Each structure stands twice: as C-alpha cells, then as structure tokens.
Image: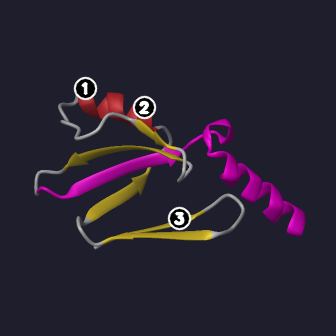
C-alpha cells in the first residue's frame, strides 16, 4: 500500500493511498536537479520530471535494486498550481 502524507502550505493534511503499487515517496529540494544528478550516476528512470499541478508537485519515478518503486517530488511554484488550489489557499487565508 502506498501512503503519502503531505502538509499543504496552509496547514491542510493530504493523504494519498494507492493499494495497487507500494512506493517510497521522498521530498527533494529540486526534482530537475535530482533527476540530472541521479541520471548522470546511472539511475534509469521510469518517468521524466513531470508537473502534477493538481497535487502542487513535480515528480519522477525509478526502481531501486530491490525493485521498490521510488517517487521523488518537490513543490511546484504557485503559478503552476491548478487554479482551484490557488483559490482554496486564498479562501483558507481569509478564514483565519
């Protein structure tokens, strides 16, 4: 089972569960830089860096030597978020 707990910028906890494929999910400072560094060290990736605007993150995926799925992610800048997330954040800040 995959379980990702992420605290969003405005304090809301998001839980993502995917029972079809277990994964290790790790936040990194910069997905693009991490992708380039690991690729130069011989890591074969399952995905190129991709924006997941609905989740406010950029992700990459690869498998470790024991065949565990690894997901590395970093936050997207707000200008790349889906519009409803920007509105949600504004509304949350107004309600405080």
In x, y percent, where is residue 13? 59, 71
Numbered tag placed on residue 6 in the rendering: 3
**Residue at screen point 34% across, 28% down:** 36
Q: Distance between the residues labelled 2 and 1?
A: 12 Å
Mark 1: which secondary structure? Answer: helix
Question: For the residues marked 2 and 3, what is the alpha-carbon distance in whole angstroms?
Answer: 20 Å
Which residue position holds label 1? 40
Mark 3, other Cα within 10 Å: few <14 / some 14–19 / many ≥20: some
Judge from the rendering whether residue 81 lies leftward or rightward of residue 17; answer left or right. right
Q: Which of marks 2 and 1 is nearer the N terminus?
A: 2
Q: Is mark 2 on a helix, strand or loop?
A: helix
Q: Name the residue under label 2.
A: 32
Tell which of 59 and 54 is nearer to you. Answer: 54
Q: Per the image, is 72 magenta? A: yes
Q: Does the magenta stretch include residue 50?
A: no
The magenta segment: 67-96
x 73%, y 59%: residue: 88
Based on the displayed image, in which of its 4 quarters is residue 46 positioned?
top left
Whole-percent x, y for residue 69 in the image: 23, 55
Residue 9 position (above or below residue 60) = below
State how far apart marks 1 and 3 are (Cα).
29 Å
The image quadrant that residue 35 belongs to is top left
Residue 68 to residue 58: above or below: below
The quadrant in which residue 14 appears is: bottom right
Q: Are marks 2 and 1 in contact (CB under 8 Å)?
A: no
Q: In this view, does 67 lie above or below 80?
A: below
Task: Tell me the crowding category of disc 1: few under 14, some 14 to 19, or many 20 or more residues within 10 angstroms, Cα based.
Answer: few
Pick the front one: 22 or 52: 52
Q: Residues within 10 Å of mark 2 (few under 14, many from 20)?
A: some
């Amino acid at each position: 089972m995959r379980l990702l707990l992420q605290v969003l910028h405005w304090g809301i906890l998001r839980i993502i569960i995917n029972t079809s494929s277990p994964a290790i999910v790790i936040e990194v400072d910069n997905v693009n830089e991490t992708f380039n560094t690991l690729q130069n060290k011989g890591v074969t990736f399952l995905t190129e860096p991709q924006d997941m605007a609905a989740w406010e993150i950029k992700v990459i995926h690869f498998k470790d030597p024991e065949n565990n799925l690894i997901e590395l992610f970093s936050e997207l800048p707000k200008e790349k978020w889906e519009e409803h997330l920007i509105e949600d954040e504004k509304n949350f800040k107004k309600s405080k």
